[in-house]
Image: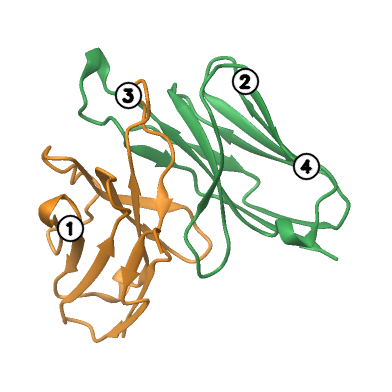
Chain colours: A green, B orange
Amino acid sequence: TQLLEQSPQFLSIQEGENLTVYCNSSSVFSSLQWYRQEPGEGPVLLVTVVTGGEVKKLKRLTFQFGDARKDSSLHITAAQPGDTGLYLCAGASIGRHGSSTNAGKSTFGDGTTLTVKP
Amino acid sequence: GAGVSQSPSNKVTEKGKDVELRCDPISGHTALYWYRQSLGQGLEFLIYFQGNSAPDKSGLPSDRFSAERTGGSVSTLTIQRTQQEDSAVYLCASSFRQTGGFWYEQFFGPGTRLTVL
């Protein structure tokens, strides 16, 4: 069973502060996604990283995929109240030997609840 | 709208009753997923349909849970003899195969909030 551990579980900061959320696993993933979810809605994709060591930037958000493709981080610079939400990482895998047994199935972390106070 | 839709948005039922939750995926998406989410928590995988392949039911918590996907499109998640611990938000997502055979983004519906009294 592939597990993804996110930390911290809860984070409450003031507007303008920086923060980093971590997503760790002992398993290797073919790709890793970060989603953001607001209350009453489904998660929405922020980014997909597929290459070990890859860094992607989305405005004030910086995403990094570990060299071994087992971990990832999300860094937010100068957080704003609009960044408040539940942040989820999800690792995707492909089956062994080309099998499609679990191709397309993602493992989700337990999420980080971020609150940015004005 | 071209997004994933789910119905009902809210469902309140009594313990022991059966419930059916519906998911309409994005047209053309061959993969469909069901997840369960408790308040403020991550997503618990339930079941996954991929094209005409046999569904991956490994996440269903008990034999009271079942799901069907008719015609490769609409899916129904059925919970029989509901229990209070079944109370949660049930999310549906759909996806498609990207170039190179990797599956990337899942598009989620707004979820159905199930409350079992």
Distance CA(mark 4)–CA(mark 2) = 17 Å
From the viewer's side, name the closer residue of A1 and B76.
B76
Label 4 or label 2, whichever comes before in sequence order: 2
Residue located at (22% from left, 53% from top):
B60
Label 3 or label 1, whichever comes before in sequence order: 1
From the viewer's side, name the closer residue of A50 and B114.
A50
Q: Subunit of mark 1?
A: B
The disc at residue B101 is: 3
Three-letter residue code for mark 1: Ser
Instruction: Indicate which label's residue lies in the foreground, 3 or 2.
Output: 3
State the quadrant of the N terminus of chain B. Answer: bottom left
Place of residue A98 in the rendered image (x, y in percent of width and height, measured from the top left):
23, 16
Instruction: Indicate which label's residue lies in the foreground, 3 or 1.
Output: 3
Helix, strand or loop at disc 1? loop
Instruction: Identify the residue position indicated by label 4 in the image.
Output: A60
Instruction: Identify the residue position indicated by label 2 in the image.
Output: A54
The answer to the question of whether label 2 and label 1 lie on touching residues, with beta carbons closer than 8 A, is no
Q: Subunit of mark 3?
A: B
Residue furthest front in the image = B1
Residue located at (29% from left, 52% from top):
B27
